[in-house]
Amino acid sequence: MDQKLNEAFVSGTHNILNDELIPQDASSGSQNWRTIDGEIELMRGRDLFGDEGGAGSVEELHSGFKADGSAVYFGKFGTEIKTYNTSTEVWDSVITGLTVDEDVVFSNYQSLAGTFVYVFSREGLWKIHTANPTSFADMYDSTKNFKGYGFIDTGRTRLAGREDDPTGLYGSYIDAQDSSVYTAVSTEAQADVSTGTLVFKAGGAKRTCFGVVLTVTTSGQVFTDDYNGVLTGDAGGTGTINYMTGAFTTDDTGAGTVDYQHEDATDKGVLDFSKSATRLAGEGFVVRQDLNGDAIQTIIPLEGRYYSIKKTSAYEFTSDTADVNPSNEVYRTDIGIPSRKAAIGTGSGIVFINTANPDKPILTILERNPVGDNIVPRELVKHFDFSPYNYDNASIETHNRYIMIACAKDSTVNNRVLVVDLQANTVDVSTYGVNAFMKDDGVLYSGDPSSESVYKTFNGFDDDGSSIENYWEGAAERFGTNALKKVKKIRLQGKIEPDQIIQVYASYDNNDPTLVGTIRGDGDYIDIESPTTVGANMIGEDIVGGGASTTIYPFFMEIKLRTSKFRKMKLKFVAPEIGYASINYTNIFDIWTYEDKLPSKYRLKQNVSLDGTTTNNADSEF
């Protein structure tokens, strides 16, 4: 064979079979390189988002939204719930005094009463209006609801994970969003419209208001609420309203009256789990999911059904149209997840890391059977071994074509992200530490497991100012024969940023890799007349939100080799500087073939007895 040509990289990492048996474009092991559109490229880096946090961890992140669609970010940092202040670019405290390691779940809910983020945990329940993100109401009421992990879907909360009942699935009232749950107030008197507080809060600390219309008696100006916390006067005046506290301001003066509505989500709303002695449609409920006694880890909706995934089994729960006769059945006894965030709903189905057999974790999807209407599990990326990683604190997020799986390897905290491309059926490995993900407007954010810092992740071309630690190691190539051979030349093609370099290593017959050449971003072989632009965000298909970009250039170059005789050869790439790098073509050629012998390192005189127990046997025939 005169040459070995690889014109595309499409296989990702293969770590189950011997490196001689995997596809020749595959990686036998890599860190912070990804397979994308026929090439391998250095993964993007991380950029600090907000203020740098001290020791601790970020245990959860969440993106809510205001009525105008703008994002509001929240997170659990150690013992606090915080929200991101876009003006100061720091994380402001909202709820304090929580337990460091206690999980929380954030859930968005939009109704006629406004846009909210609810916070569920075993320590309490809280309601935040996104227009006033630093204000909150404590919603726990032992006669109406429960502490646990919930989410709101189709106007009802589903909750599990109660400390006192880990195998119960609970449901709240269905929020009617009408006068049965909303209370209207007319012409409430206010002595001075320049500043004041609506009286609804005095009647119940859990109440929130909406639909505020303030009329100034003296000037006749009418201020209308825009559901984003702003009061706009018909004579040009401005003001504010805090829906959580009822506090308001305007730039007018004098007496006035206010019309508005208020609600209490614990009164026939999404935080009212009560029910009549004979339960009626639309009221709260509880069903038992007690198989094996292990806790419900998470509940995820799929095509009108709700799948409760435990450590060793899963249940399928379906409400009937009349909401009086639900179905609650054991779905499977051969699937399970190790932690609450180890599963996620996607447009294709529920993706989760199945650890029902802890010795053989499997990435699995629950999806519709293509030849029927039932939901069936299917194993994903079978060529990747998930067992070297620990998923006790796993966090999974989906973004565009990718499934991101934060996990740990030889560490007590998460220090790996498995980047799974479901379209291309590939897995690549990043070494970033992530406790929690959040996504918004094409940007992926991550909470750090070793500090109270948040990062824009897979964003930019450096790791918060440092170069990105990386390597890519290929398959072992025998060039179609076990005979010994030598190689004289390698040609490589790709794209690179001027300040970056790519070190090219080769190893022979399992020896340590040796540097054989370097691709320089400022080399004479760079095609400076054919520049292209790439965005700083790795995830988006385009440059997202007008974000940063950089100019890169194609290269096509050749490295001459001087090798001893070998049986198999591997290439390895390392990009040690800050900047973009990719490779889309390799051609190993000028191959000289010799005798069919073992490599010299293995050709040892076997001066042993036939039973293999005696060495230096003078009578040996070898």
Image: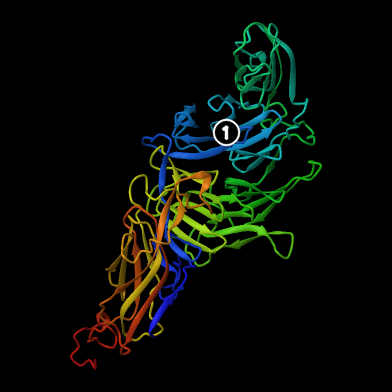
Identity of the amino acid at label 1?
Val
Q: In this image, 230 relative to 587: left or right?
A: right
Percent x, y of residue 527: 38, 64
At x 66% / y 13%, what residue is drawn?
199
Foreground pick, 331 / 164? 331
Q: Which residue is mark 1?
A: 119
Foreground pick, 132 / 78? 132
Q: In this image, 592 relative to 63: left or right?
A: left
Percent x, y of residue 105: 56, 38
349 lies above or below 456: below
What kind of element bears circle 1?
strand
**Quarter of the N terminus within the rendering:** bottom left
Percent x, y of residue 149: 58, 38
246 lies above or below 284: above
Foreground pick, 485 / 545? 545
Q: Quadrant of residue 561?
A: bottom left
Visual colour scheme: rainbow
Q: In this image, 559 relative to 244: left or right?
A: left
551 lies above or below 275: below
Percent x, y of residue 381: 53, 64
Residue lying farthest right? 322
Q: Tell me if I can see residue 264 in this picture.
A: yes
Q: Quadrant of residue 402?
A: bottom right
Q: Tell me if I can see residue 386 in this picture.
A: no
